[in-house]
Image: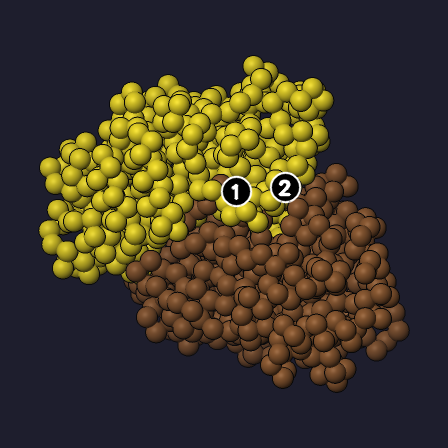
Amino acid sequence: MIALPAPNPATLARRDALVAGLRKILPAADGVIADPVRLKPYETDGLTAYRQMPLAVVLPETTEQVAAILAFCQAQNVRVIPRGAGTSLAGGALPLADAVVIGMMRMNRILQIDYADRYAVVQAGVTNLGITRAVEADGFFYAPDPSSQLACMIGGNIGMNSGGAHCLKYGVTANNVLGVKLVTITGDIIELGGTHLDAAGYDWLGIIIGSEGQLGIVTEITVRILRAAEGTRAMLAAFSSNAIAGACVDAIIGSGIIPVALEFMDRPAIHACEAFAHAGYPLDAEAMLIIEVEGSADEQTAMLERIKEICSAFAPTSLKISQNDAESAAIWKGRKGAFGAIGRISPDYLCMDGTIPTSTLPQVLARIEALSAEYGLKVANIFHAGDGNLHPLIMFDANQAGQMQKAEAFGADILRLCVEVGGCLTGEHGVGVEKRDLMKVQFTEIELDLQRAVKSAFDPDWLLNTAKVFPLDRLPARASLPHAA
Amino acid sequence: MIAPDSEAGFAAAIAAATAAKTALNLTGYGSKAGFLRPVVAGETLSTRAFRGVSLYAPKELVLSARAGTPLAELEAVLAESGQQMIAEPPRYGFLGGDGVVQSLGGIIACNLSGPRRIAWGAMRDHVLGVRAITGRGEIVRSGGRVLKNVTGLDLAKLLTGSYGTLALLTEITVKVLPIPEATGTLVLHDLTPARAVAALSAALGSPFSVTGAAYLPERAAAAMGYDRPVALIRIEDVAASVAYRLQALRQQLGRYGASALLDQAGSLAIWQAVRDATPLAVGADTMIWRVSVAPSQGPGILERAQSLGLDGYLDWGGGLLLLAGPATQAAAAALSGAVAAVRGGWWLLRAPESLRASLDAVPPEPAALAAIRGRLQSAFDPAGVFTPGKLHAA
């Protein structure tokens, strides 16, 4: 289990006074939550194995309120945990006992949509899918599409630099944001970027996006919206081994074709998803690819025929080109329901998120299989094959003594393997609390110190989302000191 | 000039400079020495002797090279596998023509992107990882060699576009893409700037994946052999798709009047010119600005620039302006004021020495951000030896 820092006793002792101070900033009846029953829903996020009740939860409705709360917390030396929808699989929104959770769900308005300049200005609590829903009638969409897009909020996407299944063509959050309104721990409101492309001066957006709430709280975001292609169509290609499917991915990319999505599932994943979604997946296959292209009907057909020809050279056990939108949707239904599917066949699961050079896929999957036997835990692998982002789903039963610890150790071994073959610990979920202690596998102490110094430049007292991202052993001193007053 | 041929050599030179508090002008081949503000440095540290591709995996769309690798050399290596740099980095004509060598490190340090930026992202969007040396002479890595990576703070993005003021980039890994099979261009004739940007916006708001959208007003068009202004819309894809989409766009944009199509050769030539600022009229005392605004603000900024004696053209659907004209303090202040008023950004790419030192070469920062920047610079470069003065007054 991952340790949390000891709470600051001085902060805990002043709880009532702190809550009263917060109520002065948010006078509305339910703007500040301190009642234990109502705090309960905030004790965890998507990493449900970890639970911790916060000191209090605040639900601001304006950027100015967020600024006042942060200035208050800094003055009182109180830690702050930003929270969107609480869907983080890495424990990015896990509270601390001495921390105030700032929930952004009431800042849920779309402020402006501009089709001529192709942007939308939204508050941090708007859901990812909510942006697309607001512009799709006009043919537009917001590109990053994490699996949690129905629930997850754009503010959280900024925190984790979220990706999705269509990154190969459309990029991740950082590639689709033009500007943000950032509130610093001192309560300053800073506008970064705007409605134009590319920063003159430092790329502040680049360092803020993906900073997991370590540098400030983003309250407003200007995102790029894109015109959707005329249509999309998917195909399935199944193979007799992981290695052959991997070689086929290489051949597709090597031919100069960049599909909009290229997803890989191994045998356990195919079986789990088929049982759940009845998508017509081939149960005799060892590995399967979902390949999506876009364009007019003729363009789709031409591209899929080319891809089919490439796949044919790898002795596919089945090839199926969808004939219409309904068939494409069925192909995606299984993949998008993967987490639910695994949840049906296993009481608990951990979703890992390493990235590997795509050429190492067969080797990595073989090692994962061996580890699976070693740990006695089943695993299903889903892989964004175009960009190397691997999601092993480790199945376990938390009610059986020791299984949770075993699953975590298994997961850590997989992530070490990802780093060892030239990849990284996390492709799109973020480090959070989950992978915090593995950061030393990927970075030297000098590199971590430089990252720590960047955090200190924004948050000198280390009050923002403390105990995430960085191993605890070198937390700056002041953050653990009792309040001086 | 110091030009080490190893990371250890750079680290030692930097550590020595920091110990002696000797400022270093970090550079490659010096092609962009005239960009932004003048650097005040006792010594020049160049990457020109540290070159070469260290990793190229075409099937993984990944290339790593040392910072001093000439851009042309990289592009030749990529072309052998039918691939290219995605963001179409420019070789600005005013740098002096074909003889000028640009390094990969310089392109990254200046985050320079060409016309394809609107469709496929900027250089900063394709930097997957860097190796760099801090002012303490420490070698650090950020990012890596995989396409998706959110592990830790994204220092690679911070260093991209930091003009050598935070760290020395020694090796950069970028995502690359296949060269499209075909390129075609739809040319719309004789539109006013506002009508042209409306047409470009309609094209970029179409489902046809436009990868270039530029407007050349009268003088820029004349430089390219057109007797009236032209709006240019580019499609890159397989040949059948290019043909189909250009026809579809032509029909959809019929209300904007007469149009023509450019073939592959004509398209490659005109977009190279747009990329390289070839249409700009540049003399000895010219100042040159690169301005980024929301596309619909482009025509207003162009008009203001023309009233100040500058002229140029629009790229990025109207959102990028390349402007040149006689250098005066008043015109410079008026132009940057007009851009600031629409909340855009600017880079002063060239001006007489006296003017460069006294202008905001990029927009000034609000006080709270400037304070953060100060602490950030100290974290990377405690003695303040890296390229002082380049972005902001030291």
Q: Please, which chain is the residue tagged with disc 1 on?
A: A
Q: How far across and how far down the image is residue B136, in percent?
A: 71, 30
Chain B colour?
A: yellow
Q: Where is residue A161 shown, x and y percent of the image? A: 57, 57
Quadrant that contains the C terminus of chain B: top right
Given the current orientation, which residue lies at the most extreme top position? B1
Q: Please identify the residue farthest to the front as the structure is shown.
A: A485
- Residue A67: name its quadrant: bottom right
What amino acid is found at the position of numbered circle 1 in the picture?
A: Tyr
> What residue occupies the far right of the structure in this picture?
A401
Q: Is residue A13 visible?
A: yes
Q: Quadrant of residue B269?
A: top left
In the displayed structure, A453 sits above or below A147; it is above
Nearest the camera: B333 or A119? B333
Question: Is A277 drawn above or below residue B298 in the view shown?
Answer: below
Q: Which residue is mark 2?
A: B376
Q: Along the line of sight, which residue is nearer the eye, A414 or B377?
A: B377
Residue A260 horizontal/vertical position (percent): 45, 58
Picture colour scheme: by chain
- Left or right of A176: which side holds A439? right
Q: Is residue A413 left or right of residue B175?
A: right
Image mark for residue A202: 1
Estimate the spatial distance between the alpha carbons at disc 2 and disc 1, rounded to whole Å: 11 Å
Viewer-closest of A12 and A348: A12
Q: Residues within 10 Å of mark 2 (few under 14, many from 20)?
A: many
Q: Is residue A229 visible?
A: no
Q: Which chain is rendered brown in the image?
A: A
Is residue A253 rendered to the left or right of residue B269? Answer: right
**Residue at screen point 34% across, 64% down:** A114
As helix, strand or loop, the secondary structure at mark 2 comes to helix
Chain under callout 2: B
The amino acid beneath tag 2 is: Leu
